[in-house]
Image: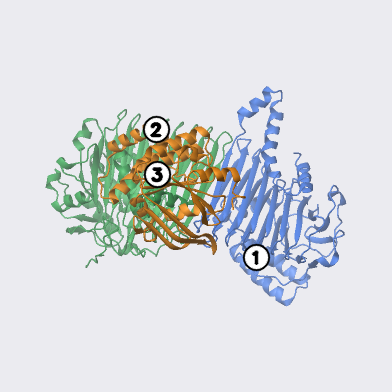
Chain colours: A orange, B blue, C green
């Protein structure tokens, strides 16, 4: 599904990622762990198409060169990024935002756009599945949301947009244990044989709730070790400092 | 008035020995002033304060020449004794004392026979008037890497002898790289109904710091205008504080150009007015290059029939990205006949900026008064306490503790 | 005279011209032209005299020049002051008698006039160049005593009301353009809501400039008698031409005791092409008088069109407890310029006003908010709240905020806030990551920015306005 080969990324001539390689198959859950400044967020930014990086190498998503696609075209193809810091957009109702977004994606895929009633039905269903209070959907997008509410809102959007590859950029940071469980339940309920996940995190604790198939350790812009879930525990015990 | 101006101008030339070049410039400026006259409310800048009307209402038979040949006595009691400081003393517009006892002599230079320059604001007739009639044009230079050890106080004293005169002062201050100056301007007027026109030019070079405190607190019947032009280079800081309280009319105008990156300007002011006083603060903060910052806070308390005006403008050039501009004005109106006018203006041509302004005016909060009275204060005490709290906020912005305390003392905070 | 057509109709979908024969007064501004207009309207002598008084006054007035957008000198002798589609001299009795070309025009503009196609719940007065060509739902409004007709008709049929109120809010002598309008106004709408009546439907006037080299000088007068309510909406479009055309309207509103008028504008005059050629000069005087106690006037405007917009819909709060509101969205793109805002003059006790202004500038355009809030010494216990927000897109455009705040009453409060911001890269990235293209993302964010104002529009127009906000900014991203 996703193939990253020799990815190199610089910002203002400072190297962030270097010789980065990763391959994700349909249905797999990968976790990338790394200390601050190791290039975790840069990876998610580059996958989503954020501008401002000098990149080289190759990223194939379902055999399409990602570098040739605009941000929104990547979203249309099924890449979803749950932001580490979801943006506040004053005056824009969350429901309207989601509907506009869903219909833009459906339209690009040649599917029928949902009308207001169909959309609300879908939202209600998903909110119920995820045990979310629908009330937040009537508020302005992320405006005045608590940290937990913002992250939950990201997961709800993910479940409605039903992406093929979901990238969770430090979704666990700043969450208390209850919110963490809700987020993890959300992710687990979306795990299907065609849906893949890339979970970017600093800590191991989220992985107690979402069992990854693979764990990779990112240091100074490249993966220095890959393994199964046990690698996360090893990392937690040793700390990043002593890992090398 | 034109007749009087002409006679007085000739008298001035006759009794002074200006250089040929200066006479030429003075004549030109004189003619420009004659053409434009005193500004009136038809000019946008003077919309809320019609100077022409204010002068004719307050000053009978204004004349433009007075003899500066004889020295004046300095009333020593005016000097601030709680603070060690350097002195420049003007009495009735004549320099009477220059004293920099606390400083290294070769780090400070004073020039007084300069060639006049064309005013940098071609629309401001009062700068023409100043250039035409000013008798001496001073320049103070603070040398590279020197910080004055003690503040400099410029005393602007007028005594009983001065009546219905136009007095003009012009001072340039140059802070060379890495220098700093704390400047207090203290006016003390025992004179009646004069028009005092002061023009300051500050050149604040790289990494230099200017702190300027303008104190007009003793009650007098003069009409004043003070124009301050400030040019700031990279990483420089200017901090202006205005206490606008004593004169019948005063307009302080500040034109600040942030020409170098990371330059910042702070303007804080207080109007504390009673009787028929009418004061104005007008600012123009020009963000010319990126990463510059300005902050303005003006508060007023108005009693009796007084009137305060704040016109504050933030201008941002298209290349001045990452500008941070903030401006807030607030006034409390204590009587039926008081008036507060504000024109907080933003003119912005760059998109990556953070600019905002706010303005509020109204009465004292009756709920707060009630609360304080329920704790045992009488109405007057409660009012006083709230007003002090309201003004203290501005005084607290003063970064020099010694001077902050001095000003708190002056206004009994 | 040959009319030059502009080929590109891609951006401005109302840019077409209706090929219809018209009757015009000779070019120029003089007594004969005023007489021509007055005769064409079959006006009584008092009306002609009133026009002449304005014309005489005009000779002593100068065009104001304090506004920020400057424009080349207008040759007032080179304008047609009157242009009417042929056959409308006698207004047709029924809409079916109208020239099919006119019907087609309004249909294309989305304002069908025919009985069977009319918009539900909205009565429309259609003004084409200098004349009102049709007014719908007249009978239904008559049943409740609401008068909704062209001002020309009102001058003939309701002279007592017109005499009493015309010029009572905007005096003949007010300023150059208002006086010019008083001398040469051609048509516009007249509304009278009798005491205690809540107007059963939205009233709307649709202004269309079609003829070239023609100025439009419309005059609207709305009177809400005691305890009545009306919501009124105006819309405007014009063909794309590479000349500048002048539109100088006067709108007067009078609200008596306990009456409320809600006046909404969606202004979409032709803005000129991408290089700033052509477009309408929209110099309009709008003023409402809250004459009675507890009266309320609320202005809502969405200004997206015109080469230059220069207007300040204002409220004079004369009656005690009266309320004035101003909600504005102004968008300038390419080389458009706008200098707009409001005046709130508090004269009565306990008067309240609220100003919400959202300005968006893109391209090479320039936007000024200019507003006056004045609380007189008699207006005890009055309040004003003002919020002006500007959004800049790019660094070739400008945003200027110029509020004038005058408080002469110690028991009154004025609060003013203003901010300037931009759409952040991060916000755009977030929206795009959710599948929106950059223009959709900008449209969404800008609509969010304008939300408080859009909410004020009648439902039927809010959707239209939202789309317009998006369209006006096309080409400004990237």
Residue underneath mark 2: A134
Give SS at disc 2: helix
* Residue B382 vs residue B333, the one in the foreground: B382
Q: Is residue C418 above or below residue C365?
A: above
**Mark pair 3, 1: CA separation:** 42 Å
Q: Residue furthest left?
A: C97
Q: Are marks 2 and 1 on the same chain?
A: no
Q: Are marks 3 and 2 on the same chain?
A: no
Indicate left or right for A60 with A16 as reference.
left
- The percent coordinates of residue B189 (x first, y second) are 77, 50
- Circle 3: is it few (<14), some (14-19), or many (20+) Cα within 10 Å? many
Instruction: Name the chain under label 2.
Output: A
- For the image, the number of numbered tags is 3
User: Which marked residue is nearer to the observer: mark 3 or mark 2?
Assistant: 2
Residue underneath mark 1: B128
Give SS at disc 3: strand
**Mark pair 3, 2: CA separation:** 44 Å
Give SS at disc 1: helix
Q: Are marks 3 and 1 on the same chain?
A: no
Q: Is residue C433 visible?
A: yes
* Residue B115 vs residue B37, the one in the foreground: B115
- The percent coordinates of residue C236 (x first, y second) are 29, 50
- The percent coordinates of residue B295 (x first, y second) are 62, 51
Point out which mark residue B13 bears.
none
Instruction: Name the chain under label 3.
Output: C
* Residue C307 vs residue A198, the one in the foreground: A198
Residue underneath mark 3: C287
- The percent coordinates of residue C440 (x first, y second) are 35, 51
């Amino acid at each position: 599904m996703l193939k990253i080969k020799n990815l190199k990324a610089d910002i203002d001539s400072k190297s962030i990622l270097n010789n980065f390689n990763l391959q994700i198959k349909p249905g797999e859950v990968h976790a990338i762990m790394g200390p601050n400044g190791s290039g975790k967020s840069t990876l998610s930014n580059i996958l989503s198409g954020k501008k401002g990086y000098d990149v080289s190498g190759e990223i194939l998503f379902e055999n399409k060169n990602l570098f040739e696609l605009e941000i929104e075209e990547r979203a249309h193809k099924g890449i979803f990024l749950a932001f580490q810091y979801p943006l506040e957009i004053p005056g824009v109702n969350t429901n309207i935002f989601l509907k506009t977004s869903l219909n833009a994606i459906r339209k690009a895929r040649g599917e029928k756009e949902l009308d207001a009633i169909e959309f609300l039905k879908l939202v209600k269903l998903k909110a119920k599945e995820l045990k979310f209070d629908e009330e937040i959907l009537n508020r302005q997008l992320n405006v005045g949301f608590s940290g937990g509410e913002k992250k939950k809102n990201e997961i709800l959007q993910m479940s409605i947009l039903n992406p093929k590859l979901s990238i969770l950029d430090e979704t666990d940071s700043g969450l208390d244990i209850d919110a963490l469980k809700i987020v993890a339940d959300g992710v687990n309920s979306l795990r299907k044989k065609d849906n893949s996940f890339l979970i970017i995190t600093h800590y191991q604790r989220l992985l107690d709730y979402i069992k990854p198939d693979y764990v990779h350790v990112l240091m100074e812009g490249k993966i220095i070790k890959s393994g199964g879930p046990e690698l996360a525990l090893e990392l937690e015990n040793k700390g990043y400092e002593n890992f090398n | 008035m034109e007749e009087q101006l002409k006679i007085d101008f000739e008298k001035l030339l006759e009794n002074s020995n200006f250089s040929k070049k200066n006479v030429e410039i003075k004549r030109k400026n004189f003619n420009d002033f004659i053409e434009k006259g005193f500004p009136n409310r038809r000019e946008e800048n003077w919309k809320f304060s019609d100077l022409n009307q204010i002068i004719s209402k307050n000053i009978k038979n204004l004349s433009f020449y007075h003899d500066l040949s004889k020295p004046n006595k300095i009333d020593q009691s005016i000097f601030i004794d709680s603070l060690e400081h350097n002195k420049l003393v003007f009495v009735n517009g004549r320099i009477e004392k220059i004293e920099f006892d606390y400083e290294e002599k070769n780090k400070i230079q004073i020039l007084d026979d300069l060639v006049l320059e064309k005013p940098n604001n071609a629309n401001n007739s009062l700068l023409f008037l100043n250039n035409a009639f000013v008798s001496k044009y001073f320049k103070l230079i603070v040398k590279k890497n020197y910080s004055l050890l003690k503040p400099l106080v410029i005393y602007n004293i007028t005594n009983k002898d001065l009546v219905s005169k136009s007095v003009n002062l012009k001072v340039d201050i140059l802070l060379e790289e890495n220098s700093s100056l704390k400047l207090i301007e203290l006016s003390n007027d025992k004179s009646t109904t004069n028009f005092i026109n002061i023009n300051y030019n500050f050149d604040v070079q790289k990494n230099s710091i200017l702190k300027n405190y303008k104190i007009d607190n003793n009650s007098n019947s003069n009409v004043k205008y003070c124009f301050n032009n400030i040019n700031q280079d990279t990483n420089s800081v200017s901090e202006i504080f205005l206490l606008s309280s004593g004169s019948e009319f005063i307009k302080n105008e500040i034109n600040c150009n942030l020409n170098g990156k990371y330059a910042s300007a702070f303007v804080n002011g207080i109007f504390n007015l009673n009787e028929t006083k009418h004061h104005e603060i007008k600012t123009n903060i020009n963000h010319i290059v990126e990463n510059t910052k300005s902050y303005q806070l003006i508060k007023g308390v108005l009693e009796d029939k007084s009137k305060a005006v704040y016109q504050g403008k933030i201008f941002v050039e298209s290349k001045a990205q990452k500008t941070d501009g903030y401006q807030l004005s607030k006034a409390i109106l204590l009587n039926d006949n008081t008036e507060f006018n504000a024109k907080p203006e933003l003119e912005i041509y760059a998109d990556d900026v953070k600019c905002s302004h706010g303005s509020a005016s109204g009465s004292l909060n009756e709920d707060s008064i009630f609360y304080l009275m329920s704790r045992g204060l009488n109405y007057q005490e409660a009012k006083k306490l709230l007003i002090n709290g309201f003004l203290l906020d501005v005084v607290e912005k003063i970064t020099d503790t010694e001077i902050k305390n001095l000003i708190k003392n002056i206004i009994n905070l | 005279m040959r009319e030059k057509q502009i080929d590109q109709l891609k951006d401005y979908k109302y840019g077409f011209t209706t090929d219809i024969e018209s009757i015009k007064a000779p070019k120029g501004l003089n007594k004969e032209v005023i007489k021509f207009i007055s005769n064409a309207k079959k006006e009584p002598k008092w009306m002609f005299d009133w026009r002449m008084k304005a014309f005489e006054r005009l000779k002593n007035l100068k065009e104001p020049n304090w506004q920020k957008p400057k424009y080349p000198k207008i040759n007032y002798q080179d304008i047609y002051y009157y242009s009417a589609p042929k056959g409308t001299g006698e207004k047709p009795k029924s809409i079916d008698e109208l020239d099919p070309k006119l019907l087609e025009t309004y249909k294309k503009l989305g304002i069908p006039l025919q009985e069977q196609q009319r918009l539900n719940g909205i009565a429309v007065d259609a003004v084409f160049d200098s004349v009102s060509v049709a007014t719908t739902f007249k009978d239904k409004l008559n049943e409740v005593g609401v008068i909704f007709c062209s001002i020309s008709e009102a001058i003939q049929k309701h002279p007592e009301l017109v005499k009493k109120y015309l010029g009572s809010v905007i005096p003949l002598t007010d300023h150059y353009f208002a006086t010019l309008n008083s001398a040469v106004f051609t048509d516009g709408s007249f509304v009278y809501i009798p005491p205690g009546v809540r107007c059963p439907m939205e009233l709307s006037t649709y202004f269309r400039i079609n003829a070239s080299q023609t100025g439009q000088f419309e005059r609207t007068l709305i009177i809400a008698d005691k305890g009545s309510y009306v919501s009124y909406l105006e819309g405007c479009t014009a063909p794309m031409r590479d000349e500048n055309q002048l539109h100088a309207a006067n709108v007067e509103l009078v609200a008596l005791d306990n009456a409320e008028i809600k006046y909404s504008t969606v202004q979409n005059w032709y803005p000129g092409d991408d290089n700033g050629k052509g477009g309408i000069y929209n110099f309009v005087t709008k003023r409402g008088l809250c004459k009675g106690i507890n009266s309320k006037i609320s202005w809502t405007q969405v200004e997206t069109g015109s080469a230059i917009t220069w207007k300040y819909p204002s409220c004079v709060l004369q009656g005690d407890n009266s309320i004035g509101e101003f909600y504005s969205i102004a968008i300038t793109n390419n080389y458009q310029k706008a200098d707009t805002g409001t005046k709130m003059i508090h004269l009565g006790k306990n008067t309240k006003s609220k100003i919400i202004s959202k300005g968006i500038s893109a391209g090479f355009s320039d936007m000024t908010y200019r507003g006056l809030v004045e609380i007189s010494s008699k207006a005890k216990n009055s309040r004003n709240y003002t919020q002006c927000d500007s959004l800049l897109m790019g660094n070739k455009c400008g945003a200027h905020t110029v509020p004038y705040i005058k408080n002469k009453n110690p028991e009154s409060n004025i609060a003013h806030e203003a901010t300037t911001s931009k759409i952040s890269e991060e916000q755009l990235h977030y929206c795009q990551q959710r599948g929106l293209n950059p223009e959709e993302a900008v449209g969404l964010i800008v609509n969010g920015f304008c939300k408080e104002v859009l909410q004020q529009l009648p439902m039927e127009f809010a959707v239209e306005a939202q789309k317009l906000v998006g369209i006006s900014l096309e080409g400004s991203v990237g």
